[in-house]
Image (cartoon, rainbow, N blue to C red):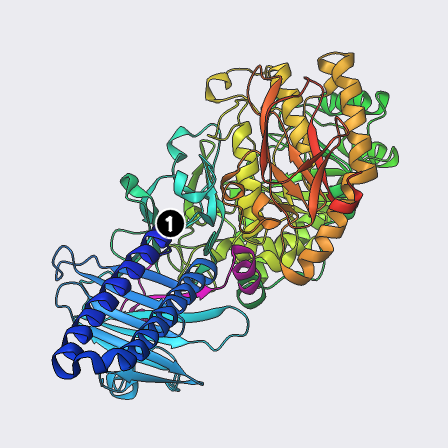
């Protein structure tokens, strides 16, 4: 889908060409009239000829005014757009394409092969169709193919080869939206609709292992649109869709696509550099479980249009997303989470945790949680501390709580087989089954485990009781719910509630996490915005690049914010080692000092902040910088995040925003992936290059505003680059928007 607009050069050439053609036509008409008048009236025709000339000149002026009106309409309103629908089926020839053209309130479907056209004109609340067509009721007389709506007054229906197409004007307020549904009449057909990524910049979809911004800079081959883990230790996970995703995309010129939640959706993004976003519905050779009741195959989605990306995003948030009534615990946004995730995951002991807590206390750093992550249990999926490595777990946790630390631990959605929790869970029907008598098995950390069925209320009650008993034994205050991706439901899975889309497993998992308190942190998301929890986008690798490195953080946070997950925490500052460092058993190697510093300078402005490596492990300069950043976060940034959080609860606006949020028509701002806004009050431009002590900073053009440089005290106009802007190792560049009248 792309906007067919006119560049300034195209518009000027169009005007010049029409003016020349009009002038030539006028000259020919004047010449013809002159000859005819002379032939019939001789010198007596002088006066009438002058009147004709004045009339012709008036007609030329009117024509030029009309051309100018067309120019203004095209240049400023940009209402002419083209959507392309391509198909994938053995019954279609290569090149079969259906185009849907929207201009104002007119749709035009064109088959490029046959040239047949169907034009639809919207008038009032009804649709008039030309040429005549079979009525929707007659097309769907067989209820087997009925799309689910009995009232077709606002719909057009079209039989197209071995597919039935229904387009409905949703009649929504604000953005103009059309629902599109393809119902296949042949079992061998897999409908595939592709939208051009050219002519606009695209955003949304999901987390990616290599997260670039905008979306068209990525390349993902066609695959099931289901969530999968992005583990820095699993290189084979690259290029799959990540643990948080939504079936929604928007572009920079005000178009949005929201796909139906129940169809077996496959998606490709710029696959083989084809500059297309393709949606495909398919059961064969996919991870979706075909249901007999769901035939024929359907491809359903809604297309919305508005003037800007910000406006269409607001419409989608209001009409397609359930927003939460409250956000995560405020302390999670005010103070950092200190965790053991980036220290040592394998041989952690009670002594390690206590030593970590003592160091934090000695340096007098603030804290929201002390999170014990990694291998602290006896078996996979157990919630209890290993009594060998943590012989005094209750005393340890109680003392840390008494010292002002809120202790949290990790929870997994699996239980290792052949241990007590598994046997107890079987009695409660707590696990996902392959059949009535066989529990599904998964390989997890070289262990055989069963997946807890969070669609089953009885399983949720069983898990809640386990956590309640654990809190009584070791009084932890909160939990981090790890994993829970749709990819866990492989093979012949049977959940208590049948899931046509396995991503709904993540929805149920997050719902359960929310039942344990608003200080829970989750690592997955699908249609779970309504729970308002902090979302962990996963540990990043200790690298500078886009593949789960430092540069991936801003695009990932911006993407999740637009998808309705604005409360994000981005893993330990400095990242964790890549796979080649798995052999380290006692202590992970420290992240590079410069990488750690630049990472912290970015993360301190985000909704969640996690630290595993204490700054005291470097030097006093790093400690002092950390204190200054924590002070700024507590005194200034937290207030901005609070204000933005309240706005999100009402409008769906993200907390961390792309530059185009304030400058919707700024073309450069639409591509910036190395800067971000905190609310609309602060622009942050961290250094993301190794060894850099300067960078180029773009200040977007915002009406009535200039930008105040917090480092240098200068004021700059928007719409310009600051090239070679100097930023010391312990500095981070930030700018505040100020009214032009205040720039003195």
Q: Is residue 715 above or below residue 151?
A: above
Residue 118 falls in image quadrant: bottom left
Disc 1, SS: loop
Relative to 284, is 592 on the left or the right? right
Q: Residue 715, position in %: x, y?
A: 73, 34
Residue furthest top as drawn: 619
Q: Is residue 13 above or below residue 190?
A: above
In the picture, which quadrant includes the N terminus?
A: bottom left
Q: Residue 162, position in %: x, y?
A: 17, 70
Q: Which residue is mark 1?
A: 199
Q: Is residue 223 above or below residue 384?
A: below
Q: Residue 453, position in %: x, y?
A: 51, 55
Q: Tell me, yes or no, if residue 262 can be seen here.
A: no
Q: Tell me, yes or no, if residue 173 can be seen here.
A: yes
Relative to 542, is 600 on the left or the right? right
Q: Which residues are magenta?
A: 289-315
What count of labels does the image hold?
A: 1
Residue 558 falls in image quadrant: top right
- Name the residue rendered at 49%, 55% in the picture: 505
Is residue 293 on the magenta stretch? yes
Nearer-the-camera pick, 340 or 21: 21
Is residue 77 on the magenta stretch? no
Residue 605 falls in image quadrant: top right
In the picture, which quadrant includes the C terminus?
A: top right
Relative to 57, is 622 on the left or the right? right
Q: Residue 208, position in %: x, y?
A: 45, 40
Nearer-the-camera pick, 348 or 371: 371
Relative to 643, is 296 on the left or the right? left
- Name the residue rendered at 40%, 74% in the picture: 105
Q: Residues within 10 Å of mark 1 (few under 14, many from 20)?
A: some
């Amino acid at each position: 889908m792309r906007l067919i607009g006119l560049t300034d050069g195209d518009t000027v050439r169009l005007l010049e060409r029409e003016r020349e053609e009009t002038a030539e036509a006028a000259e020919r008409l004047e010449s013809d009239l002159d000859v005819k008048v002379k032939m019939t009236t001789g010198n007596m025709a002088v006066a009438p000829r002058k009147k004709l000339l004045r009339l012709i000149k008036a007609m030329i002026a009117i024509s030029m005014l009309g051309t100018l009106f067309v120019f203004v309409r095209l240049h400023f309103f940009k209402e002419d757009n083209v959507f392309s629908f391509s198909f994938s089926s053995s019954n279609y020839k290569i090149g079969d394409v259906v185009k849907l053209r929207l201009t104002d309130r007119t749709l035009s479907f064109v088959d490029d092969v046959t040239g047949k056209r169907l034009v639809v004109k919207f008038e009032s609340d009804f649709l008039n169709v030309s040429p005549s067509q079979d009525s929707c009721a007659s097309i769907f007389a067989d209820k087997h193919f009925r799309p689910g709506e009995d009232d077709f007054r606002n719909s057009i229906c079209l039989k197209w080869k071995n597919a039935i197409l229904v387009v409905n004007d949703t009649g929504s307020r604000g953005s103009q939206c059309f629902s599109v549904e393809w119902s296949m009449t042949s079992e061998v057909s897999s409908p595939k609709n592709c939208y051009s990524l050219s002519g606009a910049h695209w955003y949304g979809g999901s987390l990616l292992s290599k997260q670039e911004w905008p979306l068209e800079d990525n390349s993902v081959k066609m695959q099931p649109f289901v969530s999968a883990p992005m583990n820095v230790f699993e290189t084979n996970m690259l290029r799959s869709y990540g643990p948080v995703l939504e079936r929604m995309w928007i572009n920079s010129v005000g178009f949005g696509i929201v796909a139906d939640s129940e169809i077996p959706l496959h998606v490709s993004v710029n696959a083989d550099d084809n500059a297309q976003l393709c949606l495909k519905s398919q059961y064969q050779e996919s991870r979706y479980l075909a249901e007999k009741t769901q035939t024929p195959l359907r491809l359903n989605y809604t297309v919305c249009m508005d003037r800007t990306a910000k406006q269409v995003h607001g419409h989608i948030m209001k009409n397609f997303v359930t927003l939460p009534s409250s956000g995560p615990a405020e302390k999670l946004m005010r103070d950092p989470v200190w965790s053991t995730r980036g220290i040592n995951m394998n041989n952690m002991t009670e002594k390690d945790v206590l030593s970590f807590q003592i160091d934090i206390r000695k340096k007098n750093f603030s804290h929201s949680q002390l999170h014990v992550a990694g291998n602290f249990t006896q078996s996979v999926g157990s919630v209890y501390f290993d009594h060998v490595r943590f012989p005094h777990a209750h005393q340890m946790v109680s003392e840390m709580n008494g010292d002002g630390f809120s202790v949290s631990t990790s929870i997994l959605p699996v239980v290792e087989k052949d241990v007590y929790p598994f046997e107890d869970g079987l009695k409660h029907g707590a696990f996902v089954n392959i059949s009535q008598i066989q529990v599904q098995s998964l390989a997890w950390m070289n262990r055989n485990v069963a997946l807890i069925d969070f669609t089953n209320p009885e399983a949720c009650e069983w898990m809640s009781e386990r956590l309640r008993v654990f809190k009584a034994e070791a009084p932890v205050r909160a939990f981090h719910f790890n994993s829970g991706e749709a990819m866990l439901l492989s093979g012949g899975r049977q959940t208590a509630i049948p899931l046509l889309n396995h991503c709904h497993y993540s929805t149920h998992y997050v719902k359960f996490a929310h039942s344990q308190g608003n200080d829970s942190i989750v690592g997955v998301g699908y249609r779970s915005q309504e729970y308002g929890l902090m979302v962990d986008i996963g540990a990043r690798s200790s690298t500078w690049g886009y593949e789960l490195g430092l540069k991936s953080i801003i695009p990932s946070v911006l993407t999740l914010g637009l998808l309705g997950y604005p409360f994000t925490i981005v893993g330990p500052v400095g990242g964790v080692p890549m796979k080649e460092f798995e052999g380290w058993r006692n202590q992970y190697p420290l992240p590079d000092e410069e990488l750690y510093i630049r990472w912290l300078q970015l993360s301190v402005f985000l909704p969640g902040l996690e630290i595993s490596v204490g700054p005291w492990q470097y030097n006093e300069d790093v400690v002092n910088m950390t204190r200054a950043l924590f002070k700024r976060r507590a005194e200034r940034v937290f207030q901005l995040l609070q204000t933005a959080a309240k706005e999100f609860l009402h409008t769906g606006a993200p907390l961390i925003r792309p530059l185009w949020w304030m400058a919707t028509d700024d073309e450069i701002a639409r591509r910036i992936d190395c800067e971000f806004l905190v609310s609309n009050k602060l622009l942050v431009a961290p250094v993301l290059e190794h060894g850099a002590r300067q960078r180029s900073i773009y200040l977007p053009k915002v009406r009535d505003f200039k930008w105040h440089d917090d480092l240098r005290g200068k004021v700059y106009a928007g719409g310009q680059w600051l090239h070679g802007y100097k930023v010391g190792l312990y500095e981070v560049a930030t700018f505040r928007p100020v009214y032009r009248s205040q720039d003195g």
